[in-house]
Image (tube, rainbow, N blue to C red):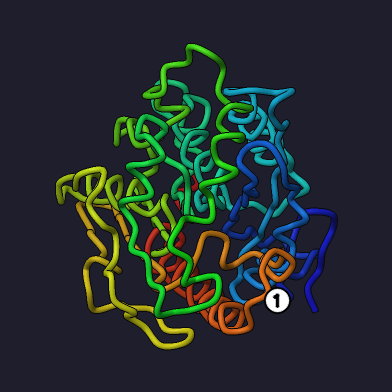
Amino acid sequence: MLTRDGSIFLPKSHDPASSQKLPTLFTIHGGGFVVGTPEENDAWNAAFAARFPVLVIALNYAKAPVSVFPTAVYDVEQLLLAALADDSLPIDHGRVATLGFSAGGNLALSVSTLPSLRGGDSGPRRVHAAVPVYAVLDFTVPQAAKTRSRPYKPALGGVRGKTYDLLTMITPVFDWAYIPRGQDLADPLLSPIYAPPEHLPSSVFMIGCELDMLAGEAWRMIRRLAGRGMNGVEEMAGREEVVAGKGELILDDQRFCFEERKSGRTNYKWLLVPDTIHGFDQTNIEVMVRDKELLEDARLKTAESQKAIGEWLFAGPFAASLAD
C-alpha cells in the first residue's frame, strides 16, 4: 500500500510517527505550458514512491495563454520553497531533486537556476539534482531543424512508423501561447540549454525519446554539460534502424547511454529511450493512441527508465545527505 495525501506520495516503508527524513523528488507535469495537471502523473509518481524510499511531491503551475513566460517558472519556485519550508513534510533537505516531463522538464531545470534554489550568496543549494524527461530545452532552433534531428522508422509500423513527428501540429500553438512577443529565445529561463553549468544542479540525468523532435536538443545539452562537445542542431540523436527489442533499453552504445562523473558529486547521465515516442511513460498515451505494440513496449520501458532514474539517484545525489 502507498500512503497518499493529495499530490504527495510516501513510500510504504515510511512510518509517519517517526522523525525519519526522506530524499525528495518534486515532479512537474508536461503539456506544452498550456494544458495538463499534476494528477496526470499520479501513476508514475505512485509507482516511483512504491519502488524507492522517496517522498514524491507533484507540483502545478499557471498555464498559458493566460499566464505566459516566465510565470510558470516562478510558480514552481514558490511551491518548491513552500514545501521545503513545511516542517510537516519529512524532507531530507540535503537530498532534493526535480523531475519534469516535456514542458515540466524545462521547468525542472529552469527553476533550479534561480538564486533562491541554486544557493551561493543567498544560501545553500536547495535542489541537488534534476531529471528532465523528453524536455523542451532550446526555443532558438526552428521546428524544421528539430524534426530533421530524429530518425524515422516506418519498419516499426503503427504510430511509431509515422514519417512525421507527432508534435509538429501542436507545438507552434503551444509556443505562440507561452512565449511573449519579442521575447529573447536564448533566455536561460526559457531555453535552459543556455544556462551556465554552475547555475544548474551538479547532477543532471537527461532522458530523451528516440522518435521525438526534442531528443536532439537534450543530447546537445547533456553533451555540453559532460564536456563532450555539442553536436549540430540537425545531427541525429539515435539511429535510423530499429535498434531494440520490446521493452529494452540500450546501455552499451553512447548515443543511447553514457555517464560522466567528475570531481565531487558532479554527475551527468544520458539515456535515449530507443524506438519510442514523446510521452511514452504517461498514462494518457492509452487514450491518445490505439497501438497495442507501442503501448506494451512503452509500459515496459517506463518501468526500465524508472529503475534507471532511481538507481542513479541513490548511487549519486541521494547517496548521502548534504543537509546541515
With 200 as the anchor, is 301 left or right in this view? right
Residue furthest right in the image: 5
Q: How many marks?
A: 1
Q: Which residue is mark 1?
A: 13
In the image, taking residue 168 as reference, residue 238 lies left or right, namely left
Q: Residue 225: percent from the left, percent from the top?
A: 25, 45
Who is closer to the viewer here, 45 or 298? 298
Q: Residue at x 69, y 63 (%)?
A: 288
> What type is the residue that disc 1 sits on?
Ser
Could you tell whether 33 is left or right of 189 in the image? right
Q: Position of residue 277 (x, y in %)?
A: 50, 65
Residue beneath the point at 42% across and 32% down: 139
**x 52%, y 34%: residue:** 111
Check the image and report above or below for 275 versus 260.
Answer: below
291 to 269, vertically: above or below: below
Q: Position of residue 65 (x, y in %)?
A: 70, 25
Q: Give the secondary structure at mark 1.
A: loop
Q: Which of the pair 270/112 is nearer the observer? A: 270
Closer to the camera in the image, 161 or 242: 161
Name the spot of residue 294 as percent of width and height, x first: 56, 78
The residue located at (47%, 87%) in the rendering is: 246
Residue 71 left/right relative to 318 = right
